[in-house]
Amino acid sequence: MSPRPERRAFARLDANLPVSFRQLAPAEWSSSHTLDVGAAGLRVMAEAPLLIGTPLAVEVRVQQQIIDFVGEVAWRRSVPGALGVRYELGVKILKITPAHRLALMRLVEAAQDRSP
């Protein structure tokens, strides 16, 4: 069986970064961490099974910088664990400043330059 072709427009970096997100409708912020990050989206852990298509306000902390954007839940997957079920969410970036997209691209590129 041949591997699936890559569909992403931007490379991804496995990264454990602090992230906060909330639904755009008035809602409380949730804090978690990323599993991977790229210039077009990221994968996060969540306590609640947000619906696909749910719009989100997202803030990711990269070193001393906060990168914020508007995204939406593109997919979700349940992850059973010792503390109960959690959810992986794929978050697609919908609206981001050029400077913040560039910061994400540089983060991934820097990690790729360091890898063997």
Image (cartoon, helix red, strand yellow):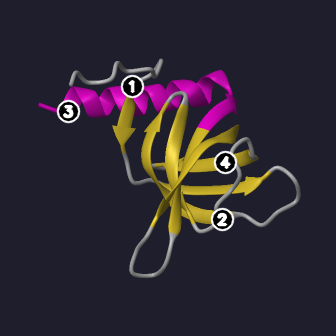
3 and 4 marks in contact (CB < 8 Å): no
Instruction: Report how far apart the C-alphas of labels 1 and 4 lie in the structure.
Output: 20 Å
Give the residue pinned by disc 2: 30
Query: SS at mark 2?
Result: strand
| Three-letter amino acid code at the position of disc 4 | Val
* Left or right: 17 in relation to 51: left
- Of 83 and 59, the residue lying toward us: 83
| Residue ID for mark 1 | 11
Name the secondary structure under disc 1: loop
Among numbered discs 2 and 4, the one appearing first in the sequence:
2
Foreground residue among 60 and 7? 7
Q: Are marks 2 and 1 in contact (CB under 8 Å)?
A: no
Neighbour tally class for label 4: few under 14, some 14-19, many 20 plus, Cα within 10 Å: many
User: What x and y, as percent, mark residue 29?
Assistant: 72, 63
Where's the N terminus, which quadrant? top left
- Pick the front one: 52 or 21: 52
User: Mark 1 belongs to which amino acid?
Assistant: Ala
User: Given contact means CB atoms under 8 Å apart, are the residues at marks 3 and 2 in contact?
Assistant: no
Identify residue for label 4.
Answer: 58
Measuring from the top left, give residue 93's x and y in whole percent.
Answer: 63, 33
Q: Nearer the viewer, mark 3 or mark 4?
A: 4
Q: Disc 4 on helix, strand or loop?
A: strand
Please report the bounds of the magenta region as a residue range. 92-116
Q: Label 2 neighbourhood size at 10 Å, few (<14), some (14-19), many (20+)? A: some
How far separated are the C-alphas under marks 2 and 1? 26 Å
Q: Residue at x 51, y 72 (%)?
A: 85
